[in-house]
């Protein structure tokens, strides 16, 4: 019995000591299970984040590629627009140069025709003078060989032959700002206006701009009311533009527009004044001049050039 009791006591003691250990092991297992579950959740979350980051990286890369392609397209478009604008400006300059060459040729032809007309008038005056001298000479009558001279000399023919039809002026009389006839030079020793202008124009074509500017000044100062003075102001503006002085050039073009309303250089002066204003960053004023030119001379070559210039500036013609 004693042994049995001992065994029972030992068993009870063992059961008593084994129960807490079994409970502790069960909690540990549950804790380990929870930790494992948490680790699995963290792993799944990490995998999900990695997948999302991969997708985000792909989107960022695609966006960057799209931006780069857009930048390349924008650069290409800008280059194309710049090339087109340069081509339009080149065509505009070419048209302006052709118009200018044509006007210059016309001016040169007018000056030569004026010289020819003057030479013909001088020749006609000399011929009339010779005819008058010859008509005033007495006829030579033969006297009789003997006896007193009782014969009546043949009366001299005092009639003067009618002058030939005068040659009309090839060029109309040049008039100034208010339709007055050409004024006499302010200096008594000034050459004729055609000679002054032709000399200045020749030096301008030869590229002697400083000398030509001085000679054009002489034309404008000696003959301020002559229409060729308007041409002189125009070419002074051209010289100043070649010297990169658009502000001063605009003033010279203004003189043509304001003081010589009938001058043939008015359309070109207004076009070049607009270009000069644009060159000194007075774009709005230049656009107004271009629109005024188109309104005043809609069918002129300068109006075509003005429309092209407005298109290059992104402005409307009206």
Image: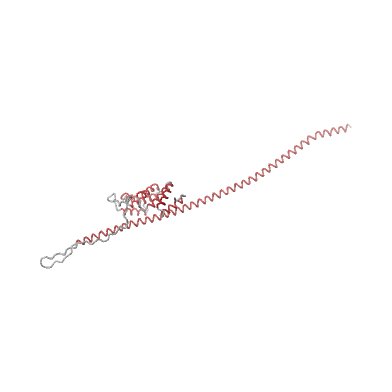
The type of colouring in the image is secondary structure
In the image shown, does 4 or 184 lie closer to the viewer? 184
Which x, y percent locates residue 190? Answer: 29, 51
61 relative to 140, above or below: above
4 relative to 72, above or below: above
State the residue lying farthest toward the bottom. Answer: 145
In the image shown, does 64 or 25 lie closer to the viewer? 64
Which x, y percent locates residue 57? Answer: 61, 46
Q: Please state the total of marks drawn on the protein image.
A: 0
Q: Quadrant of residue 21?
A: top right
Left or right of 307: which side holds 201?
Answer: left
In the image shown, does 223 or 163 lie closer to the viewer? 163
- Which quarter of the figure is the N terminus placed in? top right
Left or right of 187: which side holds 88?
Answer: right
State the residue lying farthest toward the left. Answer: 147
Which x, y percent locates residue 115? Answer: 31, 57
111 relative to 37, above or below: below
Left or right of 140: which side holds 30?
Answer: right
Which x, y percent locates residue 143? Answer: 14, 66
Q: Quadrant of residue 299?
A: bottom left
């Amino acid at each position: 019995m004693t042994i049995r009791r001992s065994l029972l006591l030992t068993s009870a003691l063992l059961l008593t000591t084994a129960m807490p250990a079994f409970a502790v092991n069960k909690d540990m297992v549950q804790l380990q299970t929870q930790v494992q579950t948490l680790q699995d959740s963290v792993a799944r979350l990490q995998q999900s984040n990695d997948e999302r980051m991969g997708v985000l990286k792909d989107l960022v890369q695609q966006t960057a590629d799209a931006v780069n392609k857009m930048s390349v397209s924008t650069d290409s478009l800008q280059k194309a627009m710049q090339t087109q604008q340069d081509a339009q400006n080149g065509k505009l300059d070419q048209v302006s140069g052709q118009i200018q060459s044509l006007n210059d040729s016309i001016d040169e032809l007018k000056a030569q025709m004026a010289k020819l007309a003057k030479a013909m008038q001088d020749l006609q005056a000399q011929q009339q003078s010779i005819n008058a001298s010859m008509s005033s000479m007495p006829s030579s009558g033969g006297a009789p060989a003997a006896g007193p001279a009782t014969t009546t000399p043949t009366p001299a023919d005092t009639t003067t032959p009618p002058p030939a039809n005068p040659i009309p002026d090839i060029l109309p009389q040049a008039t100034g700002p208010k339709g007055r006839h050409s004024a006499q030079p302010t200096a008594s020793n000034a050459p004729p206006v055609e000679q002054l202008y032709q000399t200045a124009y020749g030096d301008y074509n030869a590229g002697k701009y400083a000398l030509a500017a001085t000679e054009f000044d002489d034309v404008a100062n000696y003959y301020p009311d002559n229409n060729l003075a308007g041409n002189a102001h125009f070419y002074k503006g051209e010289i100043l533009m070649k010297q990169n002085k658009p502000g001063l050039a605009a003033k010279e073009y203004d003189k043509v527009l304001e003081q010589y309303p009938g001058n043939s250089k008015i359309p070109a002066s207004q076009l070049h004044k607009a270009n000069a204003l644009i060159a000194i960053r007075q774009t709005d004023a230049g656009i107004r001049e271009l629109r005024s030119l188109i309104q005043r001379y809609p069918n002129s070559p300068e109006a075509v050039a003005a429309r092209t210039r407005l298109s290059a500036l992104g402005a409307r013609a009206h």
